Every structure is written in C-alpha cells, then in structure tokens.
Amino acid sequence: MREMSGNILLAVVCLCLIQTRIAASLSFSWDNLSLFNVNFKTPTILGRSIAMDSNLRVENEVDPNIDEDSHLNTYGLIHKYGYPAENHTVETDDGYILTLHRIARPGAIPVLLVHGLLDSSATWVMMGPNKALGYLLYDQGYDVWMANVRGNTYSRKHVKYSTHHAKFWDFTFHEMGKHDIPSTIDYVLNYTGVSQIHYIGHSQGTVVFWIMASERPEYMDKIILMQALAPVAYLKHCRSPVVNFLAEWHLSVSLVLKLIGVHEFLPKNEFITMFNRIVCDETTITKEICSNVIFLTTGFDKLQLNETMLPVIVGHSPAGASTKQMQHFGQLNRSGAFRQFDHGWLRNHWIYGTLEPPSYQLQNVKAKVALYYGQNDWLAPPEDVEMLHSRLPNVITKYLVDDKEFNHLDFIWGIDAKELLWDRMFETMKNEENSVL
C-alpha cells in the first residue's frame, strides 16, 4: 500500500509540472497534508498558458550569446567574456575528484564561492559581466575561486567508483561539509600561500559550512568572514513543496527511487537538458510557466527574474545531486532539527551509538558570520534564519533584504541583487579586512 501511494503521489506531481495548460490554481492534498497550492494566471495564446500582464516578448530567434552561454561550461563562460579563467582539480580525503574554477587575480585576497543545491560554479558567472557576483567580486579586486561539490556536473569522478556505482552516490551534504569544503579550502590556501580566505555560500553552500565547523572546527581559523546568502540549517518552517513532499513521504519516495535504480536525483543528462530548453527556450511563449516550475521549489519573485536568461539558467541547472542528499533535506524538515542523516534507529545505533542522529554543533562556528535572508524565501524563511541566528556564536550582522518579494534564487540571480545586497556585502568584506590589519 505504501509503495502504491508513493507511485501515485509521484505521478501526480510529475503531471502537474509538465502540463502545458495550467489551471487557475495548482494544488494537491493527501489526507490532511497540503503539498502545495500555487496560483497561476491562465489566459492562453496558441493553447499555452501565459500571463496577460507579463512583459513577455515572443521572438523568432534566440540571442546567439544566450544560446552559446547555455552550452558553455564555467571555464568557457569566464574565458568568453575576457576574464582570466582557470580549472583546478581537488582530491578529497575520501577519494572524490572535484573541479574548482578560478577567476584569477594572483596576490589578491581569495574568496571562495560555494553554490547551493542542484547548482554548480556556473551560478556565479552565468548572468554575465556586471550582473554576476563572481565577476563583480573580481572587479572589486578579489581572487575568485568557485567550488563544485561531489555529484554535480563538474565533480563526477572518484578514484575508485564511477557514477554508475551506487557507492558513488552514497553521500549527503554531511560528506560535503566534512570532506569537500575542507579539501577545497586547503587547496586554495596552499596554492595562493595565504592563511585566510573569505567564504560566501548560498543555500546548501551555507549548510556545508556549518557542518565543516561542527565536524572540523579547526577550519574556522582559516576564514576571514563567512557570508551566508539564504542560510539554511533548520527547515521547520520550510514552505518548499519538494522538501515538504520528501519529508512527509520519505519512505515511499525512497522505495520508488530504489526500485527504478536511481541513486542520482534529477540527473544532469542530455534528455533533461533538452526538455528544459524546450520548455524555457527564448523562442517559446511558455516562459511564464517555466519560471513558475523553476520557482515552485524556492518561492516566486517575477520582478527579479531576468526571463531572457532562462535558457542559460536551465542549460546549467539542475546540475545533479544524490537521492540521499535530497532525503536528508526532507529529514531536516520532518524533524525540525539540524542533525546528521537518519538511517533508522537500528543503523543509527550501529553508526552513531545512539537511536537518534546527533545534532550538529553550531557553537563551533567560531568564524565571523554575516547572515542575509529574504521574506519570500521558501527554503530559508525568516523564522528558521532567526532560529539559526540564535545558535551561532559570532554573527556580526544579520540583514533582511529590503524587498518583501526577494526569494531564494534572487540572492544569486536577482536583477537588483547588486543594489539590494551585494554592495552591502562588499562593504562588509572591506571593513573586516581593515579590522584585521
């Protein structure tokens, strides 16, 4: 019965996401559980739903730059726009081989950018010069390094396993925080010869920092300042339909995914890339629907979404994650705690020595921390950020972005992110550097 329920539920969600004619409101409930309830505008043109008050433009041809950028990798994007691009390779102490991208400014203070869930290093440059945080940090005089955690587009190798092995995908964000980020930080420090770096993380990029501090607190001495964009730890008030679905139906979804042999969640393959481009291509008039589907997991803010860039966004994301990683997010929502992966009481006792998984030690986050959050963030709502803030020992600033619609992805892709947030970040970085001198 549980298996059947999981299959039915998963099928309904998939059907909702691929409809070309969307009803006035999209909702789904099971017993007393409301998975999502999102309003869509329903007027149609040529049988496809669009918003009549939208600034949508139907064009006959895709801008060649946009089409090219949707296919270029991170190195190619940086090189195309005349910035000094470098590829670096990092091997973790548990055998994963990670790609690290750099906009090189030798001799400058390094800043490490760590992407969010289902994302990659491309997120920091895909919007282009003068619009992407990676380029703007370089223009501010920094040596910019962009991490890629295990399992994403650029980090799909292991010294022993291939991506066809289930063992390759046996990780969550716990291993990223314990192995990937420390190994990446050590590489940057050794390569540049400095003793400290700036750290900027978005979403999951903040989760792995808290975990690193909990499990390997000595790394706090290597950080000048940690700036957390849409910081995630507690998911008690999370409004993401995807995370809430995984939380309420984690056993059924797990069974379904294991039955079909999927260890990678949303694999980055040619089929998915092609499907995303069909839905979100600049030449189609389904852009409004596409943006709703993308933002279904994170919240909606149409005013900050540069819809012209949607083909580039879907060309680079989703960039891959493990199924276990997604389950872990669901567990955090279900438990309301920030703790390690729950294997079930028997395996927990064997692995942890306790029936429940141990909580992460946020009191170990001794580095200076700046928290930036938004009112319309489904994954990092203000209530959960406040809970995180109360448990961190060294927060120097906490800033709620002055835009009530600012959402989870606006921190990295928002049209007005520079004026609303990034300029403030640059100033905070300079102030902390001056205080160290």
Image: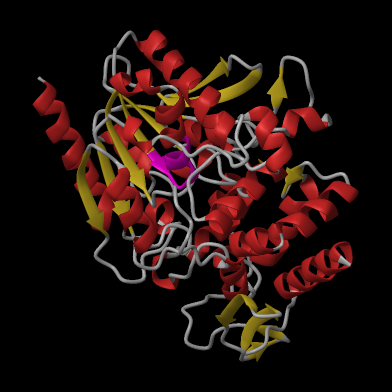
- The quarter of the displayed image where residue 277 is located: bottom right
Residue 335, given in percent of the width and then of the height, sits at 55, 54
> What are the residue bounds of the magenta stretch?
201-208
Q: Give the colouring mode of the picture.
A: secondary structure
Residue 243, given in percent of the width and then of the height, sits at 60, 59
Residue at position x 27%, y 60% in the image:
401
Residue at position x 49%, y 62% in the image:
238
Q: On screen, 99 above or below 386?
A: above
Q: Nearer the viewer, residue 233 or 356?
A: 356
Q: Nearer the viewer, residue 184 or 420?
A: 184
Q: On screen, 381 above or below 189?
A: below
Q: Main secondary structure of the magenta part?
A: helix
160 on left or right of 370? right
Q: Is any atom of residue 281 visible in this view?
A: no
> What count of labels does the image hold?
0
399 on left or right of 232? left
Residue at position x 56%, y 44% in the image:
119
Q: Is residue 25 magenta?
A: no
Residue 99, given in percent of the width and then of the height, sits at 57, 24
Q: Nearer the viewer, residue 412 or 277?
A: 412
Q: Quadrant of the C terminus?
A: top left
- The quarter of the displayed image where residue 396 is located: top left
Residue at position x 54%, y 22% in the image:
179
Q: Is any atom of residue 202 visible in this view?
A: yes
Q: Quadrant of the N terminus?
A: bottom right
122 on left or right of 72? left
Residue 424, given in percent of the width and then of the height, sits at 20, 48
